[in-house]
Image: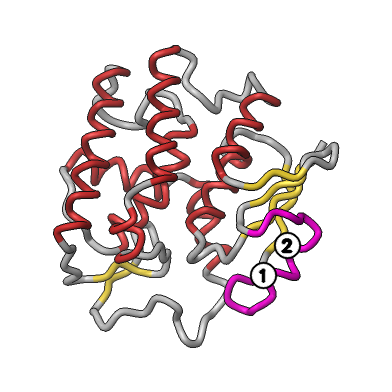
Amino acid sequence: MTYDLYIGDRTFSSWSLRGWLMFAKFNIPVRPHLVGLYSGSMADDLAPLAPARLVPAVRTPDGTVIGESLAIAETLAERHPDAGHWPSDPAARATARWLCAEMTSGFFALRDACPMQLQHCHVGFQPSAAVQTDLDRIESLWTHARALSNNPTGWLFGAYSLADVFYTPVAARIIGYGLPVSDVSHAYCLELLGDPVVRQWRADGQRVTYDPDPYALDLPHTRWPFET
């Protein structure tokens, strides 16, 4: 049975990337539908899923409509218990839920100053004190997760989980704006962005051009990692 997933522009929609990874990384059949975030058609595109009004949104095979990323995540984990969305260890599972919940409700300075874009890496971006505070908090959460799971490198809880899904767009911001983080965190960000599913998502997004670029900055830039 196939789910219907409504997503925004792949290059810029961080929440859509999270929604896609919840399916693609856990081998759950899904049929994507593109919503026009920048074309003015968003309301009409989402009308079949009312009252859902944001991406991602999902229609389950039995017709149930789900909005909000955490609700989608928990529903998929409940419906597909063997897929491995959450860590199997109870303490790790609770902590992974915490990290995802804090991601959805926080880090507004980082989000506002550094919109996700998967085009290139800006050079010379200077983060504000508020952005640096968000980065410090993110790194403290990642460090806590690694200490709990006894996993100094790689995925936060050993096996890939929803925690890695939810922080993939954060990694895109860190790499895309050249933000200062530790070597361990930088390597983790590159691992998230180098995942084949994420690379395919970006490649699909690069087939679309934008004029004007919705998040253009007057800064030099270099190529995106792994770009061939």
Residue ID at (47%, 86%): 212
> Which residues lie in the magenta part?
36-53
In the structure shown, which secondary structural element does the residue marked by tag 2 occupy? Answer: helix
Could you say which quadrant of the image residue 128 lies in?
bottom left
Which residue was labeled with disc 1? 42
Q: Nearer the viewer, residue 155 or 224?
A: 155
Corner quadrant of residue 101:
top left
Q: Residue at x 34, y 64 (%)?
A: 112
Q: Distance between the Cα atoms at labels 2 and 1? A: 6 Å
Image height check: is 187 above or below 163?
below
Residue placed most toward the observer, 215 or 200: 215
Residue carrying label 2: 46
* Image coordinates for residue 107, horizontal then vertical, percent: 32, 50
Residue 84, placed above or below residue 71: above
Please tell me how crowded label 2 is: few (under 14), some (14-19), or many (20+) other residues with Cα within 10 Å. many
Q: Position of residue 50 (x, y in %)?
A: 76, 56
| Vertical position of residue 113 compared to residue 151: above or below | below
Callout 2 touching callout 1 (CB < 8 Å): yes
Quarter of the N terminus within the rendering: top right
Q: Residue 82: in sight, yes or no?
A: yes
Kind of residue at disc 1:
Met
Report x, y in % for residue 63: 84, 42
